[in-house]
């Protein structure tokens, strides 16, 4: 027989919980500059107590016009000065009432001053969303002069193309999936085959809707050959022959075998390979451009000749200076206002203060970490990536007296503009090994040396992985062959047999 009992127990323990504000602070620390700018724009829209410090933002422009202003002040009388002071006070106290960025007065004054609306400029600079690949191809297909059943079948086929423009599904599978649907009425397997041939004829660029890489390349060769004449047309015949019968040998760079089996001399094979560079393995990418996010550095490093050292500066010109609205901060303390209003304003002011503090903390942490990098990686800036030293994040955290997670977030997705180009900040943080001379060298520096060895090799007799390991050992870097293979693959360097030139 089971017996159920209830009881009360006390247990003492410690549990760490992160408040929403702490999470927000960590998120801001980890954001690159573009994401931070977007986050600030969102906060400015949602938090009534957060505003741009117009006086601080206009300080550089005002300093440039100091002499102009001084000359004008000499002609302005005391009465006019008092009027301007009263207008300025009204503008500060009743900004939302009669002067906001969307009011006609603000727009007209900015236009009269010759200033541009930054938000309108940003909206005008945003490109319109491009059509998807299927949308563009369906638009082309409407101009194809084919019977209606084939047109229906073609519209069905075009919906099954992948991002590269290739047809991964077989026609029988597509027909079975769509048979019986209203849009496939009157479509047979024969019309599907005819529609695919018609797509290859009517749709540009050539190679779209191919069922394999080989078919994609052959369709492009056919299009090039139809547009070429004379000797170049004969060269395309060689290209078609190599793709059709010796695709694997081409991929594996077995050119002597191709020469032996085809009877072509090596010069003709090289000429055919040269023409193959005109072919595209993913013709669909020509129509749909990928969104490439721009890289903006968070930190700029420059060399100071007078002090013989590298100086770091935050690239935060895109981040507007923020402040808590004096008006709403005062209203949040006004006892005459109702409790609900004061609580709302008090919460908004607190959030505004926290976001400003988080941004300042991000700047401080990032700059401190970069300064450690400058002191520990001086040889990188003087000589190059071959001189990168091991720099674990734990050592940086201990030196700065912060948690290693803070260092990790500070360097995440950040870029540094240096005299040697724009590099990711995380690149400076890696482990390493000790060379035969007793010098510490990071893994990134070893990769740079490996790249130099491969670039300097005899392409007629490329180095094997064992030979690369031996060459590194001669430079005092003793690593295993499997490590050479791993680094070679990370650098995108093919194996020796594929690097060989004939």
Image (cartoon, rainbow, N blue to C red):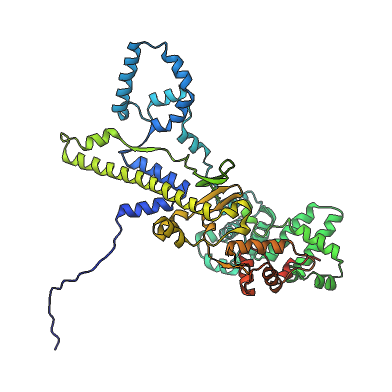
- Quarter of the N terminus within the rendering: bottom left
- At x 82%, y 71%, the residue is 256
**Name of the residue lying farthest toward the bottom:** 1
- At x 31%, y 52%, the residue is 21
The answer to whether residue 272 is left or right of residue 100 is: right
Counting every numbered tag in the picture gives 0
Give x and y (percent) for residue 153. Answer: 59, 60
The answer to whether residue 32 is left or right of residue 18 is: right
Give x and y (percent) for residue 82. Answer: 31, 15
- Is residue 253 in view from this perspective? yes
- Is residue 164 in view from this perspective? no
Give x and y (percent) for residue 437. Answer: 63, 67
196 or 262: nearer the eye? Answer: 262
Q: Is residue 444 above or below residue 2?
A: above
The answer to whether residue 1 is left or right of residue 108 is: left
502 or 197: nearer the eye? Answer: 502
268 or 401: nearer the eye? Answer: 401
- At x 78%, y 68%, the residue is 461
Give x and y (percent) for residue 405. Answer: 41, 60
395 or 279: nearer the eye? Answer: 395
- Quarter of the C terminus within the rendering: bottom right
């Amino acid at each position: 027989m089971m017996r159920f009992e209830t009881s009360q127990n006390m247990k003492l323990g410690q549990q760490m919980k992160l408040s929403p504000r702490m999470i927000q602070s960590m998120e801001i620390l980890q954001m690159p500059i573009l994401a931070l700018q977007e986050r600030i724009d969102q906060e400015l829209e949602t938090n009534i107590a957060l505003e741009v410090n117009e006086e601080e933002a206009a300080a550089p422009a005002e300093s440039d016009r100091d002499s102009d202003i001084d000359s004008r002040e000499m002609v302005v009388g005391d009465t006019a000065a008092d009027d301007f002071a009263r207008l300025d006070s009204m503008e500060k106290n009743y900004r939302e009432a009669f002067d906001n960025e969307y009011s006609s007065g603000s727009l007209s004054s900015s236009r009269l001053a010759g200033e541009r609306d930054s938000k309108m400029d940003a909206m005008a600079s945003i490109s319109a969303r491009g059509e998807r690949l299927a949308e563009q191809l369906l638009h082309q297909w409407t101009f194809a002069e084919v019977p209606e059943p084939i047109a229906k079948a073609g519209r069905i086929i075009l919906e099954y193309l992948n991002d590269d423009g290739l047809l991964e599904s077989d026609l029988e599978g597509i027909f079975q999936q769509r048979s019986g649907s209203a849009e496939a009425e009157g479509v047979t397997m024969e019309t599907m085959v005819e529609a695919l041939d018609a797509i290859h004829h009517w749709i540009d660029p050539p190679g779209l809707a191919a069922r394999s890489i080989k078919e994609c390349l052959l369709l492009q060769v056919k299009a090039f050959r139809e547009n070429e004449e004379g000797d170049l047309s004969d060269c395309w015949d060689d290209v078609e022959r190599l793709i059709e019968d010796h695709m694997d040998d081409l991929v594996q760079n077995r050119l002597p075998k191709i020469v032996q089996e085809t009877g072509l001399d090596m010069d003709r094979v090289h000429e055919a390979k040269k023409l193959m560079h005109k072919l595209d393995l993913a013709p669909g990418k020509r129509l749909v451009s990928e969104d490439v996010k721009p890289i903006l550095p968070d930190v700029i490093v420059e060399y100071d000749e007078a002090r013989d050292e590298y100086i770091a500066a935050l690239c935060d010109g895109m981040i507007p200076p923020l402040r808590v609205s004096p008006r709403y901060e005062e209203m949040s303390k006004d006892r005459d206002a109702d409790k609900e209003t004061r609580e709302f304003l008090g919460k908004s002011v607190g959030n505004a203060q926290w976001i400003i503090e988080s941004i300042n903390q991000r700047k401080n942490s990032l700059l401190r970490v970069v300064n450690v990098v400058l002191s520990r990686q001086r040889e990188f800036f003087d000589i190059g990536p071959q001189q990168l030293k091991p720099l674990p994040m734990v050592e940086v955290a201990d030196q700065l007296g912060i948690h290693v997670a803070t260092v990790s977030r500070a360097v995440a997705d950040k870029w540094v503009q240096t005299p040697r180009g724009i590099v990711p900040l995380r690149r400076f943080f890696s482990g390493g090994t000790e060379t035969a001379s007793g010098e510490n060298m990071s893994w990134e520096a070893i990769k740079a040396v490996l790249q130099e060895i491969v670039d300097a090799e005899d392409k007629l007799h490329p180095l094997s992985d064992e030979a690369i390991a031996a060459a590194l050992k001669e430079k005092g870097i003793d690593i295993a062959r499997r490590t050479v293979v791993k680094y070679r693959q990370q650098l995108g360097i093919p194996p020796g047999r594929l690097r060989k030139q004939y």
